[in-house]
Image (cartoon, grey):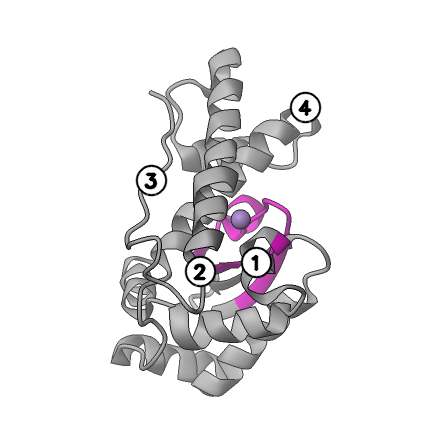
């Protein structure tokens, strides 16, 4: 069965003014769609990928030079599915209590976590992602990855929040001001209830 571009869980204009309908039109409708199309073309030509889940393809193609094209597109499909679900109209604001307590325990406070997350995104050189991850030791941590890589591929750990810092995610709305985009993401876009639901599953 072919992979499909998931519908956005909100209206294209629903994240404005922090993320415009034009950004979502290109980012979801063009960029994410292109990853899905390319992934399906690889799967069609590679019997060993057929019938595999997206998680399996991400893990089995990571770090293999002959599977680089497969990995880049599978990784980006995985990353964007999380990213769209991690945002909502009128996002940001207060976190559910369980999530806030866990973040306070592992980072020393919500403000410290937000600083660490934004710094990871701002210092990722070139294209990539920043993450809030449930580590193997059960503690939350922040990380960053280049291009289409993600914690699932690198360590098998579960990301419960991801922010795209490829230029296509912010250049229409923020031009070169990646830190401003990261602040808007954390303060006005994140769906903390969704992040909390992933923490509960981890
Ligand atoms: Mn993107």
Mark 4 or mark 3, earlier in chain: 3
Q: Quadrant of the N terminus?
A: top left
Rounded to the nearest angstrom, the CA distance separating label 1 from label 4 is 34 Å
> Is mark 1 in CB contact (under 8 Å) with mark 2?
yes
Q: Residues within 10 Å of mark 3 (few under 14, many from 20)?
A: some
Q: Position of residue 81 (x, y in %)?
A: 40, 46
Residue topped by disc 3: 6
Rounded to the nearest angstrom, the CA distance separating label 1 from label 2 is 8 Å
Instruction: Determine whether 137 is above or below 75 in the image.
Output: below
Q: Is mark 1 within 8 Å of ligand 1?
A: no
Disc ID at residue 20: 2
Residue topped by disc 1: 172
The question of residue 51 being in magenta is answered with: no
Q: Residues within 10 Å of mark 1 (few under 14, many from 20)?
A: some
Q: Secondary structure at mark 3?
A: loop
> Is mark 4 in CB contact (under 8 Å) with mark 3?
no
Q: Position of residue 147 (x, y in %)?
A: 64, 47
For the residue pair 147 and 135, the one nearer the viewer reads as 147
Q: Nearer the viewer, mark 1 or mark 4?
A: 1
In the image, is 41 to the left or to the right of 145? Answer: left
Residue topped by disc 4: 66
């Amino acid at each position: 069965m072919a992979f499909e571009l998931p519908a956005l869980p909100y209206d294209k204009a629903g994240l404005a003014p922090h993320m415009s309908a034009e950004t979502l039109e290109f980012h979801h409708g063009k960029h994410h769609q292109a990853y899905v199309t390319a992934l399906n073309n690889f799967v069609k030509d590679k019997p060993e990928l057929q019938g595999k889940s997206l998680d399996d393809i991400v893990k089995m193609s990571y770090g293999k030079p002959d599977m680089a094209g497969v990995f880049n597109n599978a990784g980006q499909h995985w990353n964007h599915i999380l990213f769209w679900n991690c945002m909502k109209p009128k996002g940001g604001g207060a976190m559910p209590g369980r999530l806030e307590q866990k973040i306070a325990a592992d980072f020393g406070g919500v403000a410290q976590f937000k600083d660490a997350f934004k710094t990871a995104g701002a210092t990722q050189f070139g294209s990539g992602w920043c993450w809030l991850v449930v580590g193997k030791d059960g503690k939350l941590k922040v990380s960053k990855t280049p291009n289409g890589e993600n914690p699932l591929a690198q360590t098998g750990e579960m990301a419960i929040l991801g922010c795209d810092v490829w230029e296509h995610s912010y250049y229409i709305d923020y031009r070169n001001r990646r830190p401003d985009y990261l602040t808007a993401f954390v303060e006005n876009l994140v769906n903390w209830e969704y992040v909390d639901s992933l923490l509960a599953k981890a």
